[in-house]
Image (cartoon, rainbow, N blue to C red):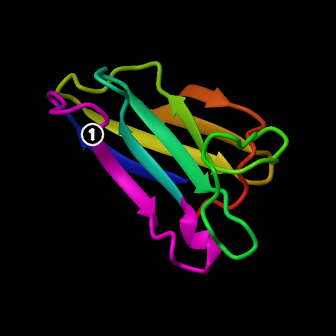
Amino acid sequence: TVEFWIKVDSFNKEFETILYKGSDDLTDSNITNNWSWQIRRHRETSRIEFVTNSYAVDQNFNLLNLETYNPVTRTGTGLYVDTLVSVSNIDDGSPHHICCVFNAETQNKYIYIDNVLDTQIENEFLTNIV
């Protein structure tokens, strides 16, 4: 769970990052460091998105082909990115309480805005969010 307060009058650029955790260092042999999450502006909209991702690597931690990975079966190779986009806009100049939740046990993701469930997605395939 990640929660924070934010007040946005307007965003400045597409996919503007609000919060981020993880590593893009593919040379790190600790595979869990290649997991990350990000909360950012959704494209050029007034909404936010909660993004989780992981690089698919072989047993020697080499990055594999990004075009052939199937996240449903976890076969093939590549980068798997999962994005949950809010329904509500947040760039109205008012403070908003944002809470993004990933439940590793149920594989569900949620975005709460101002203590109200805004959107959710169930049974996702990621399990090792750092």
Outermost residue toward the bottom in this view: 29
Judge left or right: residue 23 versus residue 54: left
Instruction: Choose between 16 and 9: the one closer to the eye.
Output: 16
**Mark 1, residue position:** 16
Q: Quadrant of residue 6?
A: top left
Picture quarter with the N terminus: bottom right
Q: Crowding at label 1, few (<14), some or many (≥20) Cα neighbours within 10 Å?
A: some
Q: For the point 74% across and 41% down, which residue is it?
A: 71
Residue 44: horizontal and vertical position, in percent? Answer: 28, 22
Q: Which residues are magenta?
A: 9-35
Q: For the point 51% across and 76% down, which residue is it?
A: 27
Instruction: Choose between 80 and 42: the one closer to the eye.
Output: 80
Judge left or right: residue 127 versus residue 10: right
Q: For the point 41% across and 40% down, which residue is it?
A: 98
Q: For the point 70% across and 41% down, which residue is it?
A: 68
Q: Amino acid at mark 1?
A: Glu
Residue 83: horizontal and vertical position, in percent? Answer: 54, 35
Is residue 42 one of those drawn in magenta? no
Instruction: Choose between 130 and 64: the one closer to the eye.
Output: 64
Using the rendered image of the protein, determine whether residue 128 is visible from the camera's viewpoint: yes
Judge left or right: residue 15 versus residue 30: left
Picture quarter with the C terminus: bottom right
Local secondary structure at mark 1: loop
Q: Quadrant of residue 107?
A: top right
